[in-house]
């Protein structure tokens, strides 16, 4: 049995990739018959949480959601597909990349609507405290690119949330202190 402080074994990105599909119903829309942004954000959180939980084999909580912008309206009756992929694990947290695609019910007008990075923290059932997460094994070129960018994104969000001093952010320090 692994020791409690020991890092679990690495897992492939494909082991936890999650696809969620929803049809946009009248209850999901705003007065313009478009999907309400808040409903989409909720589904993105659910889809990403399932993916993170599967990777970590654990309960997870959402620690942060990076900026979400809505590039294309999604209409009532459209079908959306939410694809969630783990990018990189840190100590007790993991970053998940979520992409949203929409099409009409017959598959027409397919389009990519938005994307976002969410961070989850794995929680130990017994102590209710953060626990170590398995490393992510990135195999494809795209998975490797997402993996490589994750350290900088993590530093950005920790600096913006006040958890990391800009001068301690090894990857992005020069953006804040150009002369150092
Ligand atoms: C997220 C939470 C567990 C962090 O707890 P904490 O006591 O601050 O724990 P730690 O300082 O040990 O941080 C744990 C991890 O969270 C990460 N984290 C905390 N805040 C973060 C943020 N704003 N953005 C990204 N990561 C964050 C830390 O970097 C750390 O990751 P690491 O171990 O991989 O380096 C705690 O703040 C919490 O429970 N928040 C509420 C979560 C919630 O209810 N979400 C919505 C419903 S699911």
Image: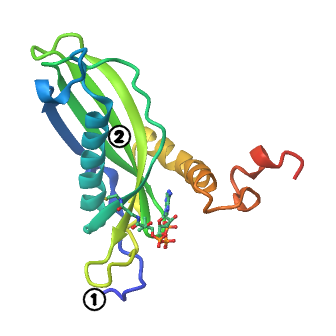
Say whether disc 2 or disc 1 marks the residue closer to the N-terminus: 1
- Secondary element type, mark 2: strand
The structure residue drawn at horizontal position 25% and vertical position 14%, both measured from the top left corner, is 32
Give the numbered dot on residue 1: 1
Give the numbered dot on residue 103: none
Q: CA distance from mark 2 to mark 1?
A: 33 Å
Q: Position of residue 48 (x, y in %)?
A: 30, 48
The structure residue drawn at horizontal position 52% and vertical position 50%, both measured from the top left corner, is 150
Position of residue 179 relative to residue 114, above or below, is below
Q: Is residue 148 left or right of residue 45?
A: right
The quadrant in which residue 175 appears is top right
Q: Callout 2 environment at 10 Å: few (<14), some (14 to 19), or many (20+)?
A: many
What residue would you read off at disc 2? 98
Of 84 and 28, the residue lying toward us: 28
Label 1, ligand 1: CB separation under 8 Å: no
Q: Residue furthest right?
A: 179
Whether residue 15 is visible, yes or no, is no
């Amino acid at each position: 049995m692994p020791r409690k402080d020991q890092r679990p074994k690495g897992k492939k990105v494909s082991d936890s990739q999650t696809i969620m599909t929803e049809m946009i119903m009248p209850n999901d829309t705003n007065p313009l018959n478009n999907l309400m942004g808040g409903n989409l954000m909720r589904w993105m959180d659910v889809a990403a949480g399932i993916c993170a939980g599967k990777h970590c084999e654990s309960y997870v909580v959402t620690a942060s959601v990076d900026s979400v912008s809505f590039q294309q309206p999604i209409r009532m009756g459209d079908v959306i597909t939410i694809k969630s992929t783990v990018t990189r694990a840190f100590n007790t947290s993991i970053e998940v990349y979520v992409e949203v695609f929409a099409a009409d019910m017959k598959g027409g007008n397919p389009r990519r609507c938005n994307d976002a990075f969410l961070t989850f923290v794995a929680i130990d059932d017994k102590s209710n405290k953060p626990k170590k997460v398995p490393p992510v094994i990135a195999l494809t070129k795209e998975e490797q690119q997402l993996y490589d960018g994750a350290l900088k994104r993590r530093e950005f969000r920790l600096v913006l949330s006040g958890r990391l001093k800009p001068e301690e952010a090894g990857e992005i320090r020069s953006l804040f202190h150009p002369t150092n």
